[in-house]
Image: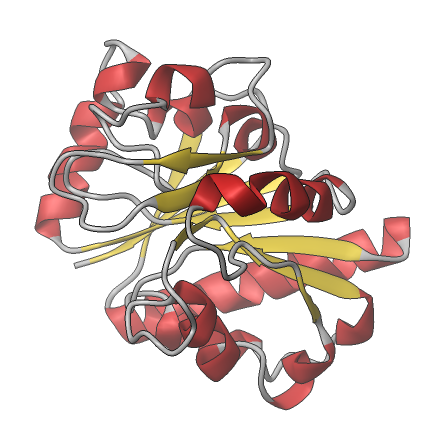
Amino acid sequence: MSDWIEYPGRTALFEGLAHVVEADLRQALKTRGKAVLAVPGGTTPAPFFEILRKSPLDWAKVSVLLTDERFVPETCVRSNTRLLREALLQDNAKAATLVALYKEADSAEQVLAQLSAGIQAVLPLDVCVLGMGADMHTASLFPGADLLEQALSDTAPPLLPMRAPGVPETRLTLTAPVLQNAGTVHILIAGKQKQEAYARACQAGPVEKAPVRIVLNRKGPVLVHYAD
């Protein structure tokens, strides 16, 4: 079950999310001596990144990875890795270690094993921040995607390539077991359309129709952070 936290505006949302994620990372550093943070791509979380990167954490002991990535080079404006470097891995957070979800190749499949090994080496996630689309996808687990059934399986590998209708590039995405086994999951939602989608996702139904349900129904804590 998820807990709903509603903020008076988006500035408060990003500040509040940064505060709780900082606290989660601090606790992981205290108990494990290291921390692993997974974050979404896209432009929505950028203000959250810009606040979090100033946190006085021991960032040298923090590994950061994306929950999903478009299979495009960092020179492309649609690269989530590029956004992560520009918005999060600056200031204090410049000392963090980036775990790659992209490597140059002709296809995602050619580098899947190498990228998967890098992810496997840092698991489990201590903190996972996810977005959610109006179609109720999360990470790059899209309804109708080619490998969705495999990605939602309890025995899925940590990383899979994903192709979906209406999604222009191949994606690489963390899979259900990785997301479900994170220490804490935070879902960032902004706007009425996403609020309505979240309400639909909370209703009973097949996970394939609303992949975000894989985390909403997990056993561990899930905090949903919302502002209009």
For the point 57% across and 20% down, which residue is it? 219
- The image quadrant of residue 134 is top left
**Can you give x and y, in whole percent of width and height, for residue 162 in the image?**
35, 35
> For the image shown, how many numbered marks are present on the structure?
0
Q: How is the image coloured?
A: secondary structure
- Residue 139 lies, with reference to residue 53, above or below; the image says above
Visible residue check, residue 11: yes
* Residue at (76% x, 47% y) in the render: 122
For this orientation, the residue located farthest to the front is 106
User: Is residue 174 placed above or below 95 in the rendered structure?
Assistant: above
Residue toward you, 172 or 93: 172
Q: Is residue 152 visible?
A: no
Residue at the (22%, 44%) spot, across then down? 133
Q: Quadrant of the N terminus?
A: top left
Percent x, y for residue 209?
A: 21, 19
Position of residue 227 in the picture relative to residue 152 (left or right): left
In the image, is residue 59 above or below residue 13?
Answer: below
In percent of width and height, residue 199 lies at 19, 30
